Image: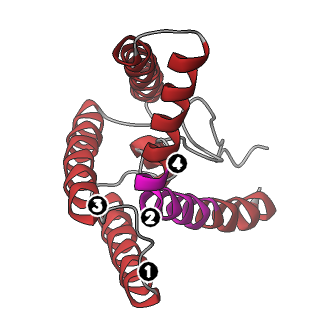
Amino acid sequence: MKKNKKIIIPVIALSILMGVGAYGVGSIYASEDNSLKNSLIEKIAQKFNLNKDDVQKVFDEDREEKKTQMEEKFNQMLDEAVSNGDLTAEQKSLILAKREEMQKERETQMSERKNDGERPSKEEMETMQEERKTEREALEKWASDNGIDLKYLMGLGGFGRGGHGGFGGPGERIDSDDSK
């Protein structure tokens, strides 16, 4: 099992870095994504002679439905971890509170970074990368201080575009059992 641990830890670390990077890219181009989505909504409305607001409503409902499903999957993963004894109820509560805190921070950052569709300068991108690095390090320290394995933080949405976890994310379990 020692070999597996030597492999699993770097893979988790790499997954976290890749997820943070993907989140950053998504944040940088969020305004571009919105204009692409709006363009698609307009095209659908025109092509099928529909009211643009009705088409927008369908997109919004779909996004909320997916968000709800992701929340449910994440909560199920945490519930399983608690019932398996991998997490305590208190740790689950801490994770959920941290998730809410991080969501509010992301929303604030997104609203601050709206820049009329212009791409950030090289200096702004470097600053954002440094901020993400600092945020990741703070989250890792928080997890360590609270005795929480990083695999339970993969679903916090900050590690992957759209909140998708990677290796070790929601629904995927990494066994650290030495008997394997």
In which quadrant will I find the N terminus? bottom right
Reply yes or no: does residue 112 show up in magenta.
no
**Count of numbered circles in the view:** 4
Residue name at image x 28 percent, y 56 percent: 110
| Residue 43 pos. (x, y %) | 56, 27
| Residue 4 pos. (x, y %) | 77, 58
Element type at mark 1: helix
Mark pair 1, 4: CA separation: 17 Å
Q: Is residue 25 left or right of residue 12?
A: left
Which amino acid type corresponds to the residue marked 3 in the rendered image? Answer: Lys
Which amino acid type corresponds to the residue marked 2 in the rendered image? Answer: Ile
Residues at marks 2 and 1 touching, judged by CB atoms closer than 8 Å:
yes
- Residue 125 is marked as 1
The residue pinned by badge 4 equals 161
The residue pinned by badge 2 equals 28
Q: Could you tell me what secondary structure mostly forms the magenta stretch? A: helix
| Residue 109 pos. (x, y %) | 25, 60
Mark pair 2, 3: CA separation: 9 Å
Residue that protrudes farthest toward the bottom in the picture = 123
Mark pair 2, 1: CA separation: 8 Å
In which quadrant will I find the C terminus? top right
Q: Which residue occupies the foreground of this view, 102 or 63?
A: 63
Residue name at image x 30 percent, y 35 percent: 92
Q: Nearer the viewer, mark 1 or mark 4?
A: 1
